[in-house]
Every structure is written in structure tokens, then in C-alpha cells.
Amino acid sequence: MNAFKYKIDSSYSEVTNLMNRVNDDGIYKSVDPQTKGEIEICLVEALNNVVRHSYKEQSGNDIELAISIFDSIITFQLTEYGLPKPHMGKPELDYDPEDIDNLPEGGMGLYIIDNLMDKTEYNSESGKNIFTMVKNI
């Protein structure tokens, strides 16, 4: 099993830097390009959600990322200490796909993550929020 741990500040620029470090560390060396793209979309979206929603775009807060690769499974665990996610259920989109002029401008990220990843799980307890994403590679 390969394991990687990262800790960043709660800012969008740090998310960008982290994504570059993950790529440089060879996390995706055994992942096909399409799956890599799906993982990157989900990881960026999840990290940006922490910055935006958990920490209300305030820097100076920790975001921890643990990545483990075992056999053909890659697991991403994001840990943060901001505001917990208010809805614990499966994300749903409520819009008319035929009405492209009125598509929602937000609220699609968790839906996309849930559909691209093979498993997601969110837990919040005693001020510690953990979001886990699992992808078969």
C-alpha cells in the first residue's frame, strides 16, 4: 500500500498548489487519463467546498488530505475543522434539464462527486469533519 499525507491552509491558491504536489508525487502513475481527470475534478471540488463552505473563504485554517492506494483502489480522506455540512443525505439536483436558460449556478459539486466516485462518506463529530472518496482504478 502507498500512502501520502498533506496539510494545507484553507485558500484556493493552496488547493491549486496541493493538486500540483499530488500530481508531482506520482499518485496517478497507474491511473488511466479519464479516471485521473474524474479524480481531479472530484478532489478540486471537495477541497474548494471546504474553503468556501466550511471555512467561509477564511485562510488560516487546516485542511488535511490523506491518500492511500491499495491494489486497484485509491482512497482520499479530507479532514477539516470548520462548519459541518448541513445535509448528510445523498446529493440531488432539482432542475429541469430541458430548461438550459435556468440551470442552477451552484449545488452541483457534491452531485458530480457522488456520481464520479465509487463511494463517498461524510462524518462530522466533535468539530472534526471527514469526507472520504473512493475510486476503483
Image (cartoon, rainbow, N blue to C red):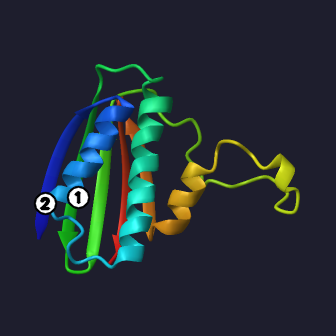
Label 2 to label 1, Cα distance in Å?
14 Å
The kind of residue on which mark 2 rests is Ala
Foreground tag (2 vs 1) = 1
Q: Which residue is mark 2?
A: 3
Side of 25 relative to 113 (left or right): left
Side of 133 relative to 70 (left or right): right
Whole-percent x, y for residue 52 in the image: 48, 31
Report which quarter residue 15 is drawn in: top left
In the picture shown, does residue 46 fall above or below 24? Answer: above
Residue depicted at 38% across the width and 53% down the height: 43
Q: Which residue is mark 1?
A: 23
Residue depicted at 20% across the width and 69% down the height: 69
Whole-percent x, y for residue 84 in the image: 47, 32
Q: Which mark is residue 113?
A: none
Side of 132 relative to 89 (left or right): left
Whole-percent x, y for residue 4 in the image: 14, 55
In the picture shown, does residue 87 fall above or below 71? Answer: above
